[in-house]
Amino acid sequence: MTKIISAEKAATLIKDGDTLAASGFGLSCWAEELGISIEERFVQTGHPQNLTVMHASAVGNRRDKGMSHLGYKGLVKRWIGGIAIASPGMAKLIENDECEAYNLPQGVITQLYREIAAKRPGVITKVGMGTFVDPRIEGGKMSPSTKEDIVKRIEIEGESWLFYKSFPIQVGLIRGTVADEKGNLTLEKEGLHMEVLPIAQAVRNSGGIVIAQVETVAKNGTLNPKDIHVPGILVDHIVVSEPENHYQTENTYYNPAFSGHVKVPEEGLETLPLDERKIIARRSAAELEPKTVLNLGVGIPVNVATIAAEEGVSDQLVLTTEAGSIGGVPAGLKDFGHAYNAEAILSHDAQFDFYDGGGIDLSVLGLAQTDQFGNVNVSKFGTRVAGCGGFINISQSAKKLVFAGTFTAGGLKVKVADGKLTIIQEGKAKKFLKNVQQITFSGAYATEINQPVIYVTERAVFELINGELTLTEIAPGIDLQEHILDQMDFSPSVSPDLKEMDPSIFNETWGKLKELVENKNNKVVTA
């Protein structure tokens, strides 16, 4: 019997009340054809309804694709996800309190699939301690109707851990490039591997059905077994997609540099204009050590890789993304998670195993809101639900951490010239608050584990010292009272050794990063 069915037929196989898990990062490994068919069936018949929907990453194009297809009242009873912001339809459902909603760390969700597959009780980890996911704080609950505690705090041999409990999954939506008639699945044109295998194993061992979207079907026996990422014994049904529903990334149909089929020149990468974002990226890059294994968040943090290229120190870095790439150059926002010229691409869950165990030497992440205790919020603003994504895993496990962002938000205008910074127009919104709305990063936990944490803006640098946000550097041309203290909702500690930020990073040409890194290398050799 053939495993090939239509997307419309596949949608009818999903029963009311099922738990559905979907792979995806942006649109990579996301089964868009199936998402469309589920939406169409619900609009026409009102079924399936009351689903529990689960996904680890940002799934969508920040407009109308991805999990937005499932963003209907009645279709979804419970959302368990890593991030919602890429799917406005789903995010709106959560914000309107039209479903139960749990925001869990991205890496934990990917690892939970493995535990479900192996019929182990769940994930036991430190990830989430002290954050809004901790049951002592919010337990990951993101809407008022969300009541059940699904994260527990447990003690093992006198030590505290968080426990994320396993549960059965009835439907798995995964994606690949080619499947043979038995359902053996390749990922050759995908830029990422994601968690397609763990989802398929979890669903099969839960007694559910796995539906795989592919570009084409091959004859049995014609695929190289080393190219198979999901064996056919785990795949129940195959849906052949229309090309327009098989994008490689959020906005790119296919780039062979992401899937490793070509290597593109890196010398032609554009330099950044001299503005506040470049200043922040330069100062963040000054924290690089020799042979740094690095993770960069979306937005300003990604620019650290560009600065490293401009300054000729790319060879001192091993850039990684939480989606699984090792080496190469991480792509920008529209293709975030992918990398040009990656040396290796790991599965999503394996990358987070490496991250959670302390594999990252340095991570540079975004700075949306912070407070007097060094807590950072990137997950919820007012009623708007963004989600934590991999932020909690990464921020808690990196050996050293830099938060990078502008000092204020919404209309900030600056002038950078002659080795100093001038504020032309202040941003409308303060980012340094007395208390953040939601704790996505816990300053108290970082202090407990002695993690070095630095907060870099265009006009000031802070460090987390003895549990307090402490001002350690100020930009040339900036007035301490007017431009820093008056723009904060609290009075920070000020270091007795307060110094000026290096004026050279405010020049058109910097040219000092290589020397900084080499000097650190000499210290390592001497030691």
Image (spheres, rainbow, N blue to C red):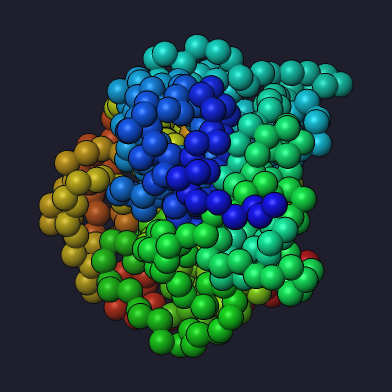
Location of residue 153 in the rendering, given as x and y in whole percent from the top left corner? 68, 18
* Depth order, front residue of 154/375: 154
* Depth order, front residue of 75/465: 75
Extreme residue in the right direction: 157
Extreme residue in the front direction: 1
Image quadrant where one finds the C terminus: bottom right
Location of residue 306 in the rendering, given as x and y in whole percent from the top left corner? 44, 73
Res. 370 image quadrant: top left
Res. 225 image quadrant: bottom right
Location of residue 189 in the rendering, given as x and y in whole percent from the top left corner? 56, 70
Residue 165 visible within the image: yes
Location of residue 258 in the rendering, given as x and y in whole percent from the top left corner? 53, 72
Q: Residue at x 42, y 28 (%)?
A: 47
From the viewer's perspective, tell me whether residue 315 is left or right of residue 63.
right
* Depth order, front residue of 33/137: 33
Q: Residue at x 67, y 46 (%)?
A: 236
* Depth order, front residue of 291/51: 51
Q: Residue at x 74, y 43 (%)?
A: 201
Q: Residue at x 28, y 61 (%)?
A: 276
Q: Is residue 280 above or below residue 71?
A: below
From the viewer's perspective, tell me whether residue 262 is left or right of residue 415.
right
From the viewer's perspective, tell me whether residue 174 is left or right of residue 380.
right
From the viewer's perspective, tell me whether residue 410 is left or right of residue 215.
left
How many marks can you see?
0
Q: Is residue 83 above or below residue 517?
A: above
Residue 398 visible within the image: no
Q: Is residue 252 above or below residue 434?
A: below
